[in-house]
Amino acid sequence: MTTLKKSLRTRIKRLPERGSFDRKLAHAILDEGLICHVGFALDNQPFVLPMAYARQDDDVLIHGSIASRLLNTLSEGVDCCVTVTLLDGLVLARSVFHHSMNYRSLVAFGRAELVVDEADKMTALERIVEHIVPGRSAEARGPDRKELAATHVLRFPLEEASIKMRTGPPGDAKKDMALPVWAGVIPLSIEAGIPERDPAQGEAHPTPSYASNYRRA
Amino acid sequence: MTTLKKSLRTRIKRLPERGSFDRKLAHAILDEGLICHVGFALDNQPFVLPMAYARQDDDVLIHGSIASRLLNTLSEGVDCCVTVTLLDGLVLARSVFHHSMNYRSLVAFGRAELVVDEADKMTALERIVEHIVPGRSAEARGPDRKELAATHVLRFPLEEASIKMRTGPPGDAKKDMALPVWAGVIPLSIEAGIPERDPAQGEAHPTPSYASNYRRA
């Protein structure tokens, strides 16, 4: 399926022209983001927690300690919501009313399931490392069996989801277009600074290029 | 109160040494962030949506159209969760297992209420603009009564909340310290690019310094 599943939950009521159900776009958002916000509810009390993740085909993979309340709750198959938001710019209109943000966000609904098979867990953890720092998994020491056993990996299938985005210049009302106020967009992006070597490590190992040239998107 | 309210909901089970209930730190996180992720649940189905916001004293202000499902649901006084996450760096350990992220996140629980008074709404909207682009509200045309009536402003009191954060170099196990693998942190930040003038606007209005020198944190 090239489109995501529409449903009552994914219906975009407000500004539907900003909505999309395109699966390729969903993949692109997931591949660019670094953290998702995972929501679940206990007795109708919502919890929203930030998590690292990676996409593997049509699954969102998350991981953490087997002692994590979040992971244990999700692994019980409760309904959850996974949201990834990329902030692309600040939209400065002539009127306060039309100020906005340029963004791409994916909101996905469903249930996660535990990845149990050891080989699948290994693959998933490598995928998460490679998603966040491409090139890293070939260098760092991989998980041993004890570490693997201490880690939960969850797979959240990307099925029922919707995208909302805004791009482009401000959309002021006609009557405001001649106001003597600068209007435009301040683009925003996540940028990497100069890598900071672990003070416990000497100069023997040069900074790898995937760290010194780190770029997102 | 200089600390946030502890409760069952804000209890930090995992790695409590990374937790904090310091109100000043909560304010600093809120003041640096640009978007929050708001969670609410309907029949135990969680929804997590990104929103612009601002802090005003001990309230988190959010706003949007009076037609917004999110705002209307929240204004009914449902339990919600407001999370702000600042991603500060990627932590590259010698072992995959100890890879991590440096971050500061605030997770707040409670109920929002509608700001009804017109003057309070005006102040709140100005506060949101100033939070996102300091200096902007003095230039852009302020909301008229019709625009004000079309906008919902919600106040979410910062009471029951917790902070979780990680800073510093990787925390590899002793036995891995001598591995021939570069270890350290790639710092990350949100950076502004060169402002893009609205193509519908001529060169008459120079780019304001709050746009060309935009900086977060």
Image (spheres, coloured by chain):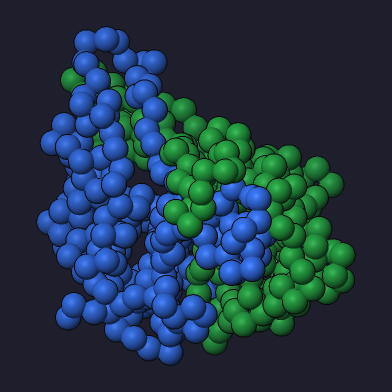
Chain colours: A blue, B green
Q: Nearer the viewer, residue B97 or A53?
A: A53
Quadrant hosting residue A103: bottom left
Residue A95 drawn at (x, y percent): 66, 60
Is residue A126 visible to the viewer in this orientation of the structure?
yes
Residue farthest toward the top in the current orientation of the protein: A203
Q: Quadrant of the C terminus of chain B?
A: top right
Q: Is residue A169 left or right of residue B62?
A: left
- A84 in relation to B67, above or below: above
Is residue A186 visible to the viewer in this orientation of the structure?
no
Residue A191 drawn at (x, y percent): 39, 36
- A122 in relation to B62, above or below: above
Quadrant hosting residue B175: top left
Q: Residue at x 75, y 47 (%)?
A: B138
Q: Nearer the viewer, residue A166 or A49?
A: A166
- A23 in relation to B142, above or below: below
Q: Is residue B193 left or right of residue B165?
A: left
Q: Residue at x 43, y 89 (%)?
A: A8
Q: Residue at x 26, y 55 (%)?
A: A31
